[in-house]
Image (cartoon, rainbow, N blue to C red):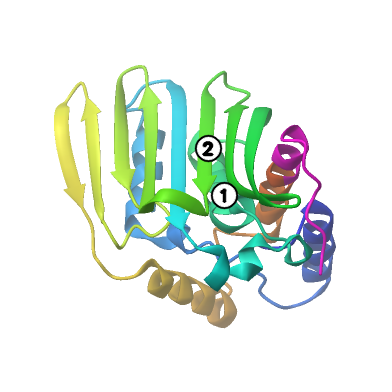
Amino acid sequence: PFTANAAEARDIAELAAKSDRVVMEAIQYRYHPLTSRVEQILTSGELGKLERIDVSLCVLLPKRSNANVYDYSLAGGALMDAGVYAVDMLRTFGGSTPEVVSARAKLGGPEVDRAMTAELRFAGGHTGRLHCALWSSNLFWASAKVVGDRGRLRYLSPAAPHLLPRLTIRSADGKRVERFPRRTSYAYQLEAFAAAVLRGEPVKTTPEGAIENMSVIDTIYRAAGLSLREPA
């Protein structure tokens, strides 16, 4: 993620505010057209009042060949590796920064979560759940589901939407599947960064948003009984 914890994110945000440099968190899924379409559907009210958001991001990263993500001294852990995307999705689709209700970790080493599950609640009354894992029974399993009182949407590979660029919506209008370009989300992210540097255009993943992401991550670690990650 952006930093090891929220305090470090605040430090970087302060430095960014004093400089003339573009500082942007590299959460590339936010720049893909599929993600923009999800936000558009939620804003339109087609799904009605939000009730629930579930995000799962599970990968298979053996410790032997991926030692860094299991290393507490390097701010390792499932929540830091895959979970930051889930946290950002919950904030983006939920419309605000959620409260952490509970969290449960499975350990892959001292203070390092190989899997993390958290229940969250938003100010509007809707709830959320994230599940992320570095050591999963599946090589790769990722999905996002948003449920409202008049419909729902679901799609796979939300952190890398170019891999499966298809969105399924069920609402009063029936069921439909929308398809999107296979162009990599990293390319869209690079274009956004270049536009910010060259033309001063705004970015979606700001230092302020990174502070919110890291604040949620810090709170999840505390709720799971684990220590905060610290800068190396």
Determine which of the numbered discs, if any, sits on residue 83 in the image.
Answer: 1
Q: In the rendered image of this protein, does residue 5 appear above or below residue 66?
A: above
Residue 43 is inside the magenta segment: no
- Residue 137 percent coordinates (x, y): 40, 48
- Residue 110 percent coordinates (x, y): 75, 52
- Name the residue rendered at 54%, 35% in the picture: 95
- Residue 157 percent coordinates (x, y): 35, 52
Image-based side of 130 in relation to 109, left or right: left
Query: How many badges with numbers are in the image?
Result: 2
Q: In the rendered image of this protein, does residue 67 appear above or below residue 194?
A: above
The quarter of the picture where residue 224 lies is top right
- Majority SS type along the magenta span: loop
Given residues 69 and 38, the one toward you in this image is: 69
Whether residues under marks 2 and 1 lie with C-beta atoms below 8 angstroms apart, the answer is yes
Q: In the rendered image of this protein, does residue 222 appear above or below residue 29?
A: above
First to last magenta residue range: 218-232
Residue tagged 2? 130
- Name the residue rendered at 78%, 65% in the picture: 73
Amino acid bearing label 2:
Leu
- Name the residue rendered at 33%, 48% in the picture: 37
